[in-house]
Amino acid sequence: MGLIALDRLRFISIELESRATVNGCRELSVLELECSIEECEPLRMPGVYRVHTICKDLSIAIELVEDVYKLPSSGKTLVYIGKDKDKCMEKEFCGQAHVVSITSLSEDTKRAVLSIGGLLVVIKGPKEHEVFNKLEVVEKYYIGIKRIL
């Protein structure tokens, strides 16, 4: 009976591993960056605010609800965007998002817009940045945020 249980676990492990791979390559995260919070601005909708961050060569603006998650107006944060829900759940905030669009703003700059139930996450940066090659329109991703002390 022990061998059957072991084989069943091995099958489950292989099945989970195959779900976590894309074209034979393991895709753990699309993007995980340490970012500096530049500004927090209230939006017209009561209790909703937008956080502007700078993450190396990307700028990320994230709309959040104060009653759900409040970031300070300065400091550092870790932003995770990927397919791994468990990794996202390790963060202080985790939301399911869909890519709405990926567009070129200029010859050098691209923008990706993701929606967490109507709240937007806007990523801007150089068009050759890896994030724009990894994100796919209409696909589901998880966005995690964690304060760095």
Image (cartoon, helix red, strand yellow):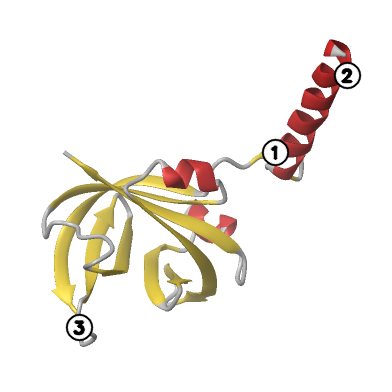
- Determine contact: label 1, label 3, CB under 8 Å: no
Location of residue 144 in the rendering, given as x and y in whole percent from the top left corner: 39, 52
Residue wearing tag 2: 4
Location of residue 54 in the rendering, given as x and y in whole percent from the top left corner: 25, 56
Q: Which of the pair 84/133 is nearer the observer?
A: 84
Residue wearing tag 3: 46
Residue type at mark 2 is: Ile
**Gap in Å between the C-alphas at discs 1 and 3?**
43 Å
Label placed on residue 106 = none
Q: Identify the residue at image location x=11%, y=55%.
A: 74
* SS at badge 3: loop
Q: Which of the pair 104/89 is nearer the observer?
A: 89
Residue wearing tag 1: 25
Mark 1 nearby-residue class (10 Å; few <14, some 14–19, many ≥20) = few
Q: Is residue 32 visible?
A: yes
Vertical position of residue 141 compared to residue 41: above or below: above
Vertical position of residue 121 compared to residue 84: above or below: below
* SS at badge 2: helix
* SS at badge 1: strand
Q: Nearer the viewer, mark 1 or mark 3?
A: 3
Q: Which of the pair 67/143 is nearer the observer?
A: 67
Residue type at mark 3 is: Pro
Judged left or right of residue 110, residue 149 is left
**Gap in Å between the C-alphas at discs 2 and 3?**
57 Å
Question: For the N terminus, which image quadrant?
Answer: top right
**Gap in Å between the C-alphas at discs 2 and 1?**
29 Å
